[in-house]
Image (tube, grey):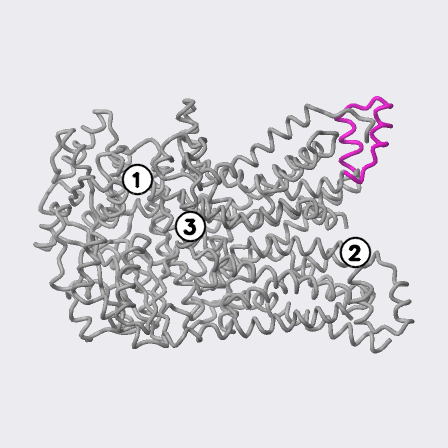
Amino acid sequence: MFKKMTAGVMAITLGASLMAGCSSDSADDGKVTLELFSNKSESIETYKGLIKEFEAENPDIKIKLDAPPEAETVLKTRLTKNDLPDIMSIAGNATYGELGRAGVLEDFSGTDLAKTVQPSYIDMINRLVGPEEEGTFGLPYATNANAVIYNKAKFEEHGLEVPTTWDEFIASLEKVKAAGDTPIYFTLKDAWTGMIAWNSLGANVAGEDFAEKKSAGETSFTDKYDEVADKMAALVQYGHKDNMGVAYGDGNNAFAAGKSVFYLQGNWAIPEILKANPDMELGVFPMPVTNDPAQNKLVSGVDVLLAVSKETEHKEEAMKFAEFMMNQDTAQKYIDEQKAFSAIEGVYQEDPVFEGIKANFENGTITSFPDHYYPAGMGAENLVQEFLIKKDKEKFLKKMDSEWEKVQNR
Amino acid sequence: MKKKNSVFLIITIPAFLLFFIFHSFPALQGIFYSFTDWKGYGDWNFVGLKNYLNVFKDERAGDAYLFTFKFAIVATILVNIISLLVAIGLNSKIKFHKTLRAIYFLPYILSILIVGFIFNFIFAHFLPQIGDAFGWEFLTRNILGNPDLAWIGIVIVAVWQAVSFNTILYLAGLVTISEDLYEAASIDGAGVWTKFWKITFPLIAPFFTINMVLSLKNFLMVFDQIVALTGGGPGKSTESISLLIYRGGFEGGEFAYQSANAVIYFIVIIVFSVIQLKFLNKREVEN
Amino acid sequence: MNRKKTSWLVTTLLILGSLLILFPLYLTITIAFKTPPEMAGNLLALPKSWSFDNFAQAIEMTNFFNAFKNSAFVTIFVVIFTVLTNSLVSYAIARNLHKKFYKFLYFYFLSAMFIPFPIIMLPLVKQTSAWGMDNLVGLIILYIVFNLSFNVFIYIGYIRAIPVELEEAAIMDGATTWGVFWKVIFPLLAPMNATVAIITSLGAWNDFMLPLVLLSDREMATLPLVQYIFQGQFSTDYNLAFASYLMALAPMIIVYIFAQKWIISGVMKGSIK
């Protein structure tokens, strides 16, 4: 009898806790909780600050920030579950394109918010969604720059000047190497960091319309990326002894500690480097890819766009947050903290660190990230990583072609 | 007696239904979707065997199978050798018997993922520091960054953890062997080696079979260690089948395609398990 | 046993081996107490001061107590209901194995042991979220159901060794089938229940993959999942990360220190059957 009673008691406890578990979602003292999903670990602190500000202005809205690793896989899992976060802060890349085509995001076309964004960035993300589906399913917010970051103190120590051609660039790397120093600090344990150089090279050598033509079967990696692959392989010669063994976070620390002269990264790495060494003096320049300085463009894309789920129960509140974010003051704060560039008209990045790429933004010598237009799930960064280890160019380019076609055909 | 039967049915039928709903039904759904082009959302069409044909042509899937099996076989063998040795050691007359046994079992209670994170640090920072300090060139680089060696790092972590459980199983077998058998063998002049092959091994053969099958099965599903250590890299050199299905199925929008992969994987596992059981049972009988 | 001499060689070898096991834990503990500047020096050194700042910061950052509560909630309910239900189901099957239906059930549950989780993962995630089960309760139900497969296997071996006469005597005294199970069989299963409880609680406490794919709401994350989620935020602050890891490992280690004899013999018993 005793056992039976224990079992009964337990059944009741479970029942009760089940109910508690179910009701606790809605019983949040009348507050609306929004989930903000972000794919960047670098912006967590900035977002936390902005959220605090927003919550102070809107006491009945609570925002929960979620920035998991492998964010795109997590986001796609949520899409499969039909359970998208209320607000998403994601990059303007193929995943955005797929979400746009899936028809799960709010369309911002023609809204007042969308009008505050520089039209070229709206075009950039519209191209990602492609011709099958028309619409602007996100608000481009922050943009980035894919660049060469350099340690100013070391730069002077080696008597270098900012290179404007590929040959000059290689010459400076050579000079550093000859002096017994490490030219570039690679962090290729994290595959995506290999794409920084890849994108600069690819955009300038293979042209902006490569993805479109590749999808139409008019061109291929084998045709267009031969030079890119050669130059990638050349750059890795100027790394440190464990290029493949160091991850991004450790690389930021190492560069901050003066372990190399150059660092191939985006603007987003700058706050991380400065966090590790606040007194460091940094400079940036666009990677000179060809020997014609007029031809070298800076790779810049939509690093962050804000999207709102179509299915959210709290659309009004989500829109309120989007408005708050798009506000000029907020946008300025975001780019100042993140050392990013704004997609919003009239908001400028004034940090002297970016002196070396300012001209590109002013005169429009900018091109977008080639890999943002690669089909999602192709895993290009892992293939590039593998190539940098094995250096088997022909096989690698063929594989890039076949993986692209494989994903496209699925 | 009739009443008794109905009680048993009342117990087992819900269990059967729940198991069917949450285990078999998803498996059947997976088989169903493997014949479609579903992305996990939106519309879908039947595509027949296209997904299956594509899996066979898919180099990435092929590499994942090769890696997973290489890893699982090596790890299984190492785990069984090491844990058998440790178990024999623990079963002999030693000091600190209880404490040592407790230490050797400790890894079993730890989260694989967290252990992986800790080892990730060891590979990335501690070993290179040792390498630099002693001038051992091979240690100065993170082995997880080398596509030819990264899998060994994963094996080390997997073995470190799995030895604990298998040791206990072997120990359970060893304590059942009577000391007298060894005494008798010693009188006959048998050496350590002979005693092991003639007495110990035959008597713990059933444990050996179970350990081999269970470890192989667990290692074939390797996931946590890889997520914590390499994320499948460098390149795709340590991408296991589980990781491929998870990543491809969700992120790549290849729900149907990876379902086909999962079905193939299932068939492979069954075939493997059957062969293994047959082989090991045969030895057991022979012995 | 006393006839043999203590083998110091084997003892020494085993002690050396055990250092390999303890070393990563030593590293975890010391790093958790160090500060970032100390990381530049000898990694083997002890921390300069034993300050709990890293732990306080990690608790706040990862909302440790919430994750702990989630893990404890899941583990406790999974263990209790796994032991109660799985033993009952096993009993029903064990006593009717001569009948076709039960024999089928036995092999049905058993064969599921050979189905790797990734095979059912994609549809399961879809199905559970459609049914509103992408939460801790859903997780608990899935663990209990999935555990059947292994537990039926080990329970049945044990139950078949219990003489039927015991039950018949109880029935003579007027007990129902329920009564027989709870009053006669369940207490006799105590050693096996302990084994199942230990293996189940370790499995539920340490599992990563099912929570990863099933739970969307970060408030519900279990301890291992939290360590994963915060990888990006730990970034290169290894001291903070290791403090967090240590706290996630600690509850099980503490339980183990006090109950290791019992836990080990529990697992051993399960394997002999």
Q: Amino acid at mark 1?
A: Asn
| Residue with the mark numbered 3 | C56
Does residue A346 appear in this view?
Answer: yes
Q: Is residue C52 above or below residue C212?
A: above
Tag nearer the camera, 2 or 3: 3
Does residue A224 appear in this view?
Answer: no
Give the letter of the chain under mark 3. Answer: C
Q: Dot 3, crowdedness within 10 Å: few (<14), some or many (≥20)? A: some
Q: CA distance from mark 2 to mark 1?
A: 57 Å
| Residue with the mark numbered 1 | A253
Kindly identify which numbered label has been placed on residue C70. none
Task: Answer with the quarter of the image where residue C51 lies.
Answer: top left
Q: Amino acid at mark 2?
A: Tyr
Is residue B195 in the magenta section?
yes
Residue A214: give x, y in percent of width and height.
Answer: 28, 56
Look at the image and give the residue range highlighted in magenta.
Answer: B175-202
Both marks 2 and 1 on one chain: no
Tag nearer the camera, 3 or 1: 3
